[in-house]
Amino acid sequence: MKTKGDDRIDLLAFKVEGFGSDTFAIDVLSYSRNSILYFWNQERIFLVYKPDHIKWLPSAINYPRIPSRRLFWFLMPFIGLYGFALPIFMFGCLCVRFRPKVCWTENTWVAAVWGGARKLGLCKYSIYSVGDWLGASSNKNLIIYLANNVLWRSFDYLAATLSDLMVNLTKEIGEARDQFWGRRVGKRVYTSFPP
């Protein structure tokens, strides 16, 4: 039984919803039921599990839906900023509030923030799981170019260097990152496939 003021959790996880999500949830809960688990997809961020002693957390936060394609392109910079800032703010606050022992995410923005939080002593370990290397070489759209080639790569570098463990889905992901930066990036790197 948790007492007042003893809200520290064992694991805070933020994962893409998809293949393997159910297994991941089972793994998290087998590690510790004193965990908070969120998934996200193209439409929303949603709570999968929280311990009973934590009384309030948002159960879902929906991303905006724009009915008109013309309006979407007009609002795209603001939607992108919202999609970038929302998880950083939300999971940064959760990390400060609950001071998890382990922070695990597939989200590059959040991984960079949690890596910094670990340096400040707000979590004990941070794990960054990487499913792709996003850098695009096209100059066709300035906003997309800056988002993929400047912002995303910078946050990926921070996440990779500040995390205790980086899990690359394939060896090619790690090789692309290392080739771009001209050196091995990350302290402890594990590759999921091939095992």
Image (tube, rainbow, N blue to C red):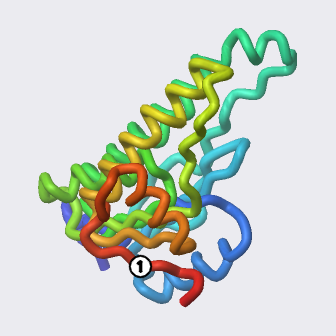
From the top left corner, tell me how far across and down residue 97 is, in percent.
Answer: 27, 51
Residue drawn at x 43%, y 32% is: 150
Residue drawn at x 57%, y 63% is: 131
Please rate how many residues cluster around mark 1, counting C-alpha atoms within 10 Å: few if below 14, some from 14 to 19, many from 20. Answer: some
Q: Nearer the viewer, residue 150 or 112?
A: 150
Report whether 191 appears left or right of 61.
Answer: left
Amino acid on which the number 1 mark rests in the picture: Tyr
Q: Is residue 97 visible?
A: yes
Quadrant of the frame with the N terminus: bottom left
From the top left corner, tell me how far across and down residue 91 is, in percent.
Answer: 40, 48
Mark 1, secondary structure of its residue: strand
Report whether 105 appears left or right of 158.
Answer: right
Q: Is residue 98 visible?
A: no
Residue drawn at x 41%, y 57% is: 179
Choose top left, top right, bottom left or bottom right for residue 137.
top right
From the top left corner, tell me how far across and down residue 134 is, in percent.
Answer: 57, 47
Residue drawn at x 56%, y 33% is: 83
The residue at the far right in this view is 68
Q: How many marks?
A: 1
Residue 25's place in the image compared with 84, above or below, is below
Report whether 33 appears left or right of 40.
Answer: left
Q: Nearer the viewer, residue 182 or 14?
A: 182
Check disc 1 and report the residue beneath it: 190
Choose top left, top right, bottom left or bottom right for residue 174.
bottom left
Residue 61's place in the image compared with 142, above or below, is below
Quadrant of the frame with the C terminus: bottom right
The residue at the far left in this view is 120
From the top left corner, tell me how far across and down residue 178 is, in percent.
Answer: 38, 59
Residue 112's place in the image compared with 32, above or below, is above
